[in-house]
Amino acid sequence: MAELTLTRICKSFGALDVIKGIDLEVRSGEFVVFVGPSGCGKSTLLRIIAGLEESTSGKLTIGGKDVTDAEPSKRGIAMVFQSYALYPHMTVAENIGFGLSLARRPKSEIEAKVRAAAETLQLIHLLDRKPKALSGGQRQRVAIGRAIVRDPKVFLFDEPLSNLDASLRAQMRLEIAELHTRLKTTMIYVTHDQVEAMTMADKIVVLNGGRVEQVGSPMELYRKPATPFVAGFIGSPKMNLYTGEVAQRFGCQTYGIRPEHIRLSQAKGAWQGRSDISSASAPMPSSIWMFRKSAKWWCGPKERPLLQRVPPFGRVRWKAQRTDSAFSRLVEPESEKTCLKKLA
Ligand SMILES: Nc1ncnc2c1ncn2[C@@H]1O[C@H](COP(=O)(O)OP(=O)(O)OP(=O)(O)O)[C@@H](O)[C@H]1O
């Protein structure tokens, strides 16, 4: 069931169009990550969902209810910010329970919820401390605790780990992923760190210039990038993208080869690649991508003259001859017989 839907959401700041018509569906319990380069509109989109920013046009529903114009507090969401936004003069317990106190919930309810959240986040022994006596990771956990006690339908995280050092970030990544497994609540997480996106997400939304470039699971984006932008953005180190002519009738195309699929060959001046095709549904070896100028995934079997003799599954090898400028004979699949021998 869709927990959250965005329909043609647009946002302009004065003359600057920042979000340019976004349609998106987030299913109940999904962990969705928004990624994209700096300035692509990730935080603005999250803030629109939270109600902290008004959309210029479009419709937003949460839990089936139209909340396009609803107050943030009426949307059933909780947000965790990069800066933690803790109150320095309050204890951990008071910080976690702050939203409930504001909502004038009974003291016994606040205490019980704060304790439960603190147990989940291993903060019980720190409940009486002030934020300045906590580590960065502990502060972030308090901020998450404050979100948990609201019992939201949707958690929103805005780059929550970017102030932490690398090892703590890795640990917190795991903790948030475990929290998601335990709570099974819908989570939307903004980051520009694609490692976070690849390791945490059920579904990644790649944004570029205020538009959705592609939506898919981490492996879908890795295996079938829809555009050269996604191909270059997902994967570390980045996919090599070359523009050149393989066969005259196809004109100039963009080709992508992942660095991890390139092996050095004995033959002088040649590159040798390996690719795994795990199922018959894979349209082509995972290590070679061809993009049309229109930036569409190239998958029609007849349109793959260079790859059509590759068997539908198994391990195949290919060679790429490097020429000085363009790649005139970039991909040369081995003959069917050779491939079949290897599969035998
Ligand atoms: N209140 C505002 N007024 C004017 N322009 C804004 C405002 N908020 C954001 N912008 C602009 O909107 C664009 C998108 O900003 P946003 O913060 O959503 O990007 P982002 O993808 O989250 O970037 P980053 O990864 O750097 O945080 C940027 O060009 C930014 O300068």
Image: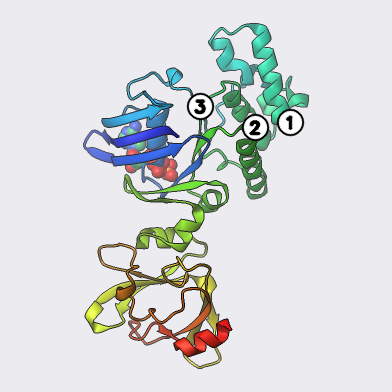
Q: Is residue 210 above or below residue 280?
A: above
Q: Which residue is mark 3?
A: 153
What residue do we see at 29% from left, 73% from top?
253
Instruction: Inspect this view and state whether residue 216 appears.
Output: yes
- Bin the neighbour count of mark 3 within 10 Å (Cα to Cα): few under 14, some 14-19, many 20 and up: some
Give the Cα separation between the discs numbered 3 and 1: 23 Å
Element assignment for label 3 = loop
Is the CB of the residue bearing disc 2 within 8 angstroms of ligand 1?
no
Residue 336 at what x, y percent from top left? 45, 86
Residue 128 at what x, y percent from top left? 74, 19
First in sequence: mark 3 vs mark 1: 1
Give the Cα separation between the discs numbered 2 and 3: 19 Å
Protein image colouring:
rainbow
Instruction: Inspect this view and state whether residue 234 appears.
Output: no
* Circle on res. 141: 2
In this view, the residue farthest toward the right is 125
**Quadrant holding the C terminus:** bottom right
Please tell me which residue lies in front, 215 or 300: 300
Q: Quadrant of residue 229?
A: bottom left
What residue do we see at 28% from left, 68% from top?
292
Q: Amino acid at mark 2?
A: Arg
First in sequence: mark 1 vs mark 2: 1
Q: Which residue is mark 1?
A: 122
Residue 17 at what x, y percent from top left? 25, 40
| Left or right: 171 in relation to 265 | right
What residue do we see at 36% from left, 41% from top?
41
Element assignment for label 2 = helix
Q: Amino acid at mark 3?
A: Lys
- Bin the neighbour count of mark 2 within 10 Å (Cα to Cα): few under 14, some 14-19, many 20 and up: many
| Left or right: 30 in relation to 97 | left
